[in-house]
Image (cartoon, rainbow, N blue to C red):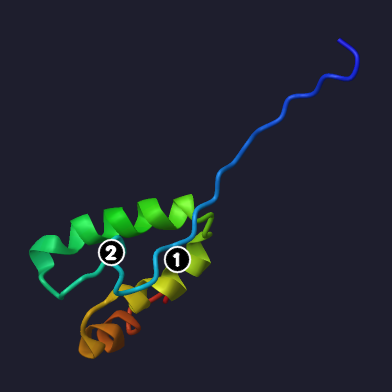
Amino acid sequence: MIGMTDSTVMIVKKMPAPGLSKAPMWSGDLSKLLAFLMKFERLAKAAAMDNKAMVEAVVEYLKKNSDVKFWKTFKGY
């Protein structure tokens, strides 16, 4: 058919700001790390963040400053 094209609609949501009730937050409890990362990744992908942006933003969702310093020591941060 002439004039018809395939189109994809992508809904992009904003990443919830750190500290908001819907935002992921990691308290430093290792038993909750996987759940935190899964929620963070799901929300970050919905916000159309690429991997680099996710790596840079994840530290904003860590509760303790000491965790932020530790997180930044990982290779690839």
Q: Is residue 31 left or right of residue 47?
A: left
The disc label shown at residue 24, or none: 2
Dot 1 falls on a residue whose secondary structure is helix
Instruction: Determine the residue positioned at 23% across, 83% down.
Output: 67
Element on which disc 2 rests: loop
Give how far across and how far down residue 42 sits, in percent: 37, 51
Question: In terms of sequence position, does the residue under pointer 2 or pointer 1 come before the other?
Answer: 2
Q: CA distance from mark 2 to mark 1?
A: 13 Å
Residue 29 placement (x, y as % from top left): 10, 71
Tag 1: residue type? Met
Q: Is residue 27 above or below residue 72?
A: above
What type is the residue that disc 2 sits on?
Pro
Q: Nearer the viewer, residue 51 or 2?
A: 2
- Find the residue positioned furthest to the top: 1
Q: Residue at x 63, y 36 (%)?
A: 9
Mark 2 neighbour class, 10 Å CA radius: few under 14, some 14 to 19, many 20 or more: many
Write down the quadrant of residue 2 in the picture.
top right
In the rendered image, which quarter is residue 69 located in?
bottom left
